[in-house]
């Protein structure tokens, strides 16, 4: 008998041999490290199949969690074995056995995935510390919540049902972890974007740029208020993994409106992140739609980077049709927002056109520039400045057009192109780290000029935040 991933079923004799080998190893460790406790981690998986990709992933989480609990103590031994009888980890630690057991029971009982961990603590005298020694109740059944030993003795549930429930817990844990991590990366991207200094005409750590109604703290308040929205977008993407990308985009519309309201409540009515709500929200959903390809097993950096690029292309699949229909409606003279009026007057599509094109400026310019500058040794701040310049040199920033008119926006883009050529040349000959001071000085002077002219390239700033989000996602951060 094999499971769907080709793992062979284990017999009772197989499991007994594994148990005997585990007991022998525990005895050997207590002999080698007298006065220590042995902690043994196994997976609590019902049925004859004891390992597969999902179980191994959950086990890896458990290993790290146990290490975190043991961190305050002296660790003498830390090893794992991965056999068909199930993965196991053994630790030897200098700690008080009862307190160690209490903390590890909190791990078993405190997280849904902890319910699948089977953690034994062997005292220095060789006795196993029982939960009853701490006055704790027996562990609960995965299916009905009754004491697990009672259900096991009465065989109240089928092995298949218990095995399926274990995998449901694993999937739910890692999907929720993905949702949290994606939202954290989105908020982090917004916070990093506003922190990058000196940015021309934009709010940063040095000044408010061309703005009089906001500062860096306004952006911090706004970014923090958007965390639940980004979680909602990532979760929506997960729900549409096998669905229509356009339907996924449509499902984001009401959460987007609620996010704008939350932003304005947090900022006292100031529009700090309306563009980012659109672009980063779509991106979080696109990452969610690609979760199956980007979650278990994609451990290589290049695979994660490919996943980020695929997510940007997926943004185009989600938005291309709806955006085209919106543009056709605007052609009828019904545009009402500043961006819509610009499209009707000048044919500049702004962030909607960027999204419909799969955020080509991020895929082809900002993200590669960010990665190349980081690889060259630049700080995240300086690499982000270079990525921002790359964006400003290649895109028509609707915010700059709205504030500075066609002439002001054209002059801004020409300056960006000059600085961008300098960056590209310095990067190509390996001298950018040593010449970054010149870039920074030019950016500082440019900031003063754009701020006086009240020109702010806010659209480029939003795209920089999107590039940062995809960078963090591609790094597994």
Image (spheres, helix red, strand yellow):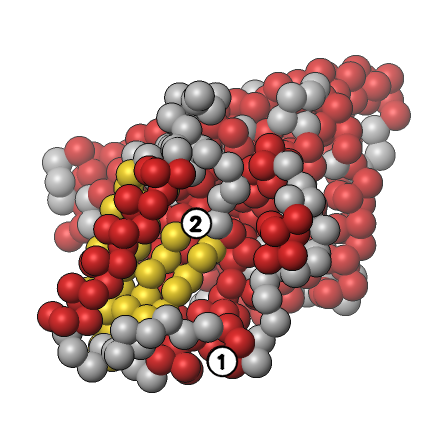
Vertical comparison of 96 with 225: above or below:
below
Quarter of the image that includes the N terminus: top left
Residue placed at 62% from the left, 19% from the top?
A: 317
Who is closer to the viewer here, 109 or 324? Answer: 109
Residue placed at 16% from the left, 64% from the top?
A: 28
Question: In the figure, residue 289 lies in which quadrant?
Answer: top right
Secondary structure state at the residue bearing disc 2 = strand
Residue placed at 59% from the left, 45% from the top?
A: 169
Image x and y of residue 372, in percent: 27, 38
Task: Identify the residue under disc 1.
Answer: 133
Whether residue 375 can be seen here:
yes
Task: Identify the residue under disc 2.
Answer: 43
Position of residue 323 in the picture relative to residue 392 (left or right): right
Question: In the figure, residue 398 lies in which quadrant?
Answer: top right
Callout 1: 10 Å neighbours few (<14), some, many (20+)? few
Query: Tag 1 or tag 2, which sits nearer the N-term?
Result: 2
Vertical comparison of 190 with 421: above or below:
below
Whether residue 165 can be seen here:
no
Who is closer to the viewer here, 128 or 417? Answer: 128
Secondary structure state at the residue bearing disc 1 = helix
Question: How many numbered discs, if any?
Answer: 2
Vertical comparison of 76 with 411: above or below:
below
Callout 2: 10 Å neighbours few (<14), some, many (20+)? many
Residue placed at 35% from the left, 29% from the top?
A: 303
Camera-nearest label, 2 or 1 = 1
Who is closer to the viewer here, 134 or 92? Answer: 134
Question: Between marks 2 and 1, how big is the CA–CA gap?
Answer: 22 Å
Label for residue 425? none
């Amino acid at each position: 008998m094999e499971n769907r991933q080709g793992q062979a079923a284990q017999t009772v004799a197989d499991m007994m041999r594994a148990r005997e080998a585990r007991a022998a190893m525990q005895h050997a460790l207590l002999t080698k490290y007298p006065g220590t406790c042995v902690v043994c981690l196994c997976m609590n998986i019902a049925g004859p199949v004891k390992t597969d990709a999902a179980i191994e992933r959950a086990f890896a989480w458990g290993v790290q969690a146990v290490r975190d609990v043991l961190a305050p103590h002296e660790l003498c031994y830390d090893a794992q074995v991965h056999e068909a009888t199930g993965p196991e980890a053994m630790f030897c630690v200098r700690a008080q056995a009862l307190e160690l057991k209490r903390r590890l029971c909190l791990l078993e009982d405190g997280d849904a995935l902890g319910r699948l961990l089977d953690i034994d603590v062997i005292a220095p005298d060789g006795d196993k510390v029982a939960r009853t020694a701490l006055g704790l109740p027996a562990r609960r059944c995965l299916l009905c919540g009754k004491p697990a030993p009672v259900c096991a003795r009465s065989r109240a549930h089928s092995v298949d049902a218990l095995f399926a429930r274990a995998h449901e817990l694993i999937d739910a844990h890692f999907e929720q972890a993905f949702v949290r991590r994606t939202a954290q990366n989105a908020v982090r991207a917004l916070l990093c974007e506003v922190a990058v200094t000196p940015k021309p005409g934009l709010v940063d750590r040095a000044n408010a740029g061309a703005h009089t109604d906001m500062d860096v703290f306004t952006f911090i308040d706004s970014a923090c208020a958007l965390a639940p929205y980004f979680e909602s977008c990532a979760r929506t993407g997960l729900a549409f993994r096998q669905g229509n990308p356009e339907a996924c985009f449509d499902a984001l519309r009401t959460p987007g409106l609620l996010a704008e309201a939350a932003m304005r409540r947090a900022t006292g009515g100031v529009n700090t992140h309306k563009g980012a709500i659109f672009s980063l929200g779509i991106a979080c959903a696109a990452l969610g739609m690609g979760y199956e390809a980007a979650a278990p097993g994609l451990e290589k950096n290049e695979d994660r980077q490919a996943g980020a690029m695929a997510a940007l292309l997926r943004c185009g699949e989600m938005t291309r049709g709806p955006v085209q229909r919106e543009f056709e409606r605007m052609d009828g003279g019904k545009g009402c927002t500043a961006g819509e009026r610009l499209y009707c007057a000048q044919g500049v599509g702004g962030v909607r056109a960027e999204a419909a094109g799969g955020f080509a400026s991020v895929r082809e310019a900002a993200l590669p520039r960010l990665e190349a500058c980081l690889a060259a040794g630049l700080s995240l701040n300086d690499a982000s400045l270079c990525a921002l310049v790359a964006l400003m040199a290649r895109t028509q920033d609707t915010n700059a057009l709205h504030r500075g008119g066609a002439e002001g926006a054209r002059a801004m883009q020409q300056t960006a192109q000059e600085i961008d050529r300098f960056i590209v040349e310095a990067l190509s000959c390996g001298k950018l780290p040593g010449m970054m001071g010149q870039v920074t000085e030019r950016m500082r002077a440019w900031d003063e000029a754009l701020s006086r002219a009240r020109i702010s390239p806010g659209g480029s700033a939003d795209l920089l935040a999107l590039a940062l989000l995809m960078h963090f996602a591609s790094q597994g951060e």
